[in-house]
């Protein structure tokens, strides 16, 4: 594998970052995860726009303005040929003496690496996945894709301790999102998801799926979802850039619904993948949700 660090392409074991980097000391940085299929980045513009919003939110100037991100990421994919991949990129405020306040002068640290995307096997389509619910104990700006993810890590580990793939988070009696995903619920063929705001990450897959379904006349509503509505729903889905759309069939150790992936999920996944494949054939990875 070849990684990228501050202008160099090199094996990750040769990529060295100072212990005085503010990403290491404070979690002072942001990140993105961008999927690629057949060597082509998917929805790159949307991911880079979100990266720009995260950088602006933490008052960190974009270290690779203009078209530089696309050039760097596309070369990184060429350096790591193979099947479907995800690109992780991270930007921190850089190296400076340890002080909570921003340093007067520091050069941002930019790191990126590539990992395989595991295909969604037949087990998911046949059996779905397991999730737990947990209190949302994260900070108040979850709309920033911050590298400070300890609360998410603890929630995901709690899920792993119960042989589940995700923790679905609840705050003040309402659904927020998953520890590393957005969450949809389906009730009487209406698709609900938590509205955008500081409590959740504006997921790229979330937005893309909503656009695809609405273009086909689905009733999709961005509304607060009470815990009771979550538990009483017909279906629960998890969405993320590398997992796409997953059906939850066990919740808190018990079968959810009839314990099988639901028919609405099957149709939604089919529509998502058709739109994804069309988008990959369009320059710029943009698609009209026809």
Image (spheres, rainbow, N blue to C red):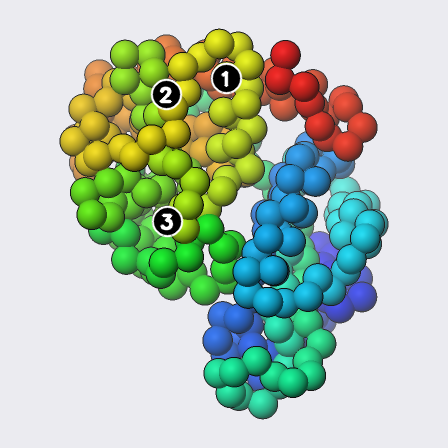
Residue 1 image point, x, y percent = 71, 55
Q: Looking at the image, which is closer to me, 269 or 141? A: 141
Residue at numbered disc 1: 213
Residue at numbered disc 3: 199
Residue at numbered disc 2: 191
Q: Taking the image as drawn, is residue 162 in sight?
A: no
Residue 88 image point, x, y percent = 62, 52
Residue 168 image point, x, y percent = 30, 41
Task: Tell me the SS state at disc 3.
Answer: loop
Dot 1: within a 10 Å radius of its alpha carbon, few (fewer than 14), some, or many (20 or more) residues? Answer: many
Task: Tell me the SS state at disc 1.
Answer: helix
Residue 74 image point, x, y percent = 79, 46
The answer for how far apart the CA atoms under marks 3 and 2 are is 19 Å
Tell whether 114 sits left or right of 234: right
Say above or below: 103 vs 216: below
At 68% across and 58% down in the image, what residue appears? 112
Looking at the image, the residue that sits furthest to the bottom is 97
At 65% across and 46% down in the image, what residue appears? 49
- Considering only order in the chain, which callout, 2 or 1, is on the residue closer to the N terminus? 2
The answer for how far apart the CA atoms under marks 3 and 1 are is 24 Å
Tell whether 252 sits left or right of 98: left
Whether pointer 3 and pointer 1 mark residues with C-beta atoms closer than 8 Å, the reply is no
- Considering only order in the chain, which callout, 1 or 3, is on the residue closer to the N terminus? 3
Q: Looking at the image, which is closer to me, 20 or 120? A: 20
Q: Looking at the image, which is closer to me, 175 or 265? A: 175
The answer for how far apart the CA atoms under marks 1 and 2 are is 9 Å
């Amino acid at each position: 594998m070849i990684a990228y660090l501050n202008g160099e392409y090199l094996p990750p074991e040769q990529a060295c970052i100072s212990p005085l980097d503010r990403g290491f000391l404070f979690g002072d940085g942001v990140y993105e995860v961008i999927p690629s299929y057949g060597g082509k980045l998917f929805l790159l513009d949307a991911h880079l726009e979100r990266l720009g919003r995260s950088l602006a939110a933490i008052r960190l100037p974009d270290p690779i303005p203009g078209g530089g991100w696309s050039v760097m990421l596309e070369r990184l994919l060429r350096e790591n040929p193979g099947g479907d991949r995800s690109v992780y990129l991270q930007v921190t405020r850089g190296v400076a003496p340890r002080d909570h306040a921003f340093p007067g002068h520091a050069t941002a640290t930019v790191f990126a690496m590539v990992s395989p995307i595991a295909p969604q096997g037949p087990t998911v389509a046949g059996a779905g996945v397991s999730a737990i619910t947990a209190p949302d104990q994260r900070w108040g700006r979850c709309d920033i894709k911050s590298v400070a993810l300890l609360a998410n890590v603890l929630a995901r580990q709690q899920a792993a301790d119960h042989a589940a793939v995700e923790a679905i988070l609840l705050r003040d009696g309402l659904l927020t999102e998953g520890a590393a995903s957005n969450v949809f619920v389906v009730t009487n063929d209406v698709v609900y998801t938590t509205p955008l705001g500081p409590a959740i990450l504006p997921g790229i897959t979330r937005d893309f799926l909503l656009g695809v379904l609405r273009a086909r006349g689905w009733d999709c509503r961005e509304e607060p979802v009470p815990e009771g509505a979550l538990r009483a729903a017909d279906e629960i889905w998890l969405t993320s850039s590398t997992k796409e759309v997953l059906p939850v069939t066990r919740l808190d150790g018990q079968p959810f619904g009839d314990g099988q992936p639901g028919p609405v999920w099957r149709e939604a996944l089919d529509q998502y993948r058709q739109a994804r494949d069309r988008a990959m054939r369009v320059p710029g990875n943009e698609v009209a949700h026809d």
